[in-house]
Amino acid sequence: MRRGIVIGRFKLTRQGGWEGEINTLTIQRQIRLVPNDDRVSENAPAFRVMMGWQHVGDAWERQSRSEPFRQYLRVRIDDPLCPISAMLFTDPEDMSARLVLPPPQTRRSQMDAQERGDE
């Protein structure tokens, strides 16, 4: 099994969200995941991704399909030059987290699904 690439490290905030930095070849930015208190449906994102006061993406709560089951956030950042679809996994104490890009084969499958409109 191939592992993803860690592109960010985050800490839990007092407000119940996450804050940290993304580091890729093209992006080095501080962002925050702010709880979405205005969820109008089950499919609404659980968090808003913010850079300063600008809304740059969203994050949804998910659970892994394989055992042991693991909770994570599916994060989508809408950067016009380099859109990011990643996963935020917490450490065992739930005080810090890592933002991980899925392995290349998984990313291709996700992009294909988005183009078909499956997601």
Image: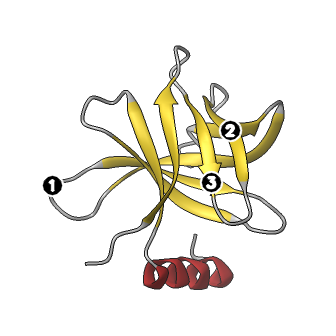
- Dividing the picture into quadrants, the one containing residue 40 is top right
Q: Percent from the top left, x then y, of residue 44?
A: 61, 44
- Element type at mark 3: strand
* Residue under label 2: 31
Please state which of the two labelled residues, at mark 1 or mark 2, is closer to the viewer. 2
Q: Are marks 3 and 2 in contact (CB under 8 Å)?
A: no
* Residue under label 1: 68
Which residue is located at x 33 percent, y 30 percent? Answer: 94
Q: Are marks 1 and 3 in contact (CB under 8 Å)?
A: no
Q: Quadrant of the N terminus?
A: bottom left
Q: Which of the numbered marks, if any, corresponds to residue 3?
A: none
* Residue under label 3: 23
Please state which of the two labelled residues, at mark 3 or mark 2, is closer to the viewer. 3
Q: Percent from the top left, x then y, of residue 35?
A: 59, 29
**In the rendered view, would you say 56 is above or below 50?**
below
Mark pair 3, 2: CA separation = 11 Å
**In the rendered view, would you say 87 is above or below 97?**
below
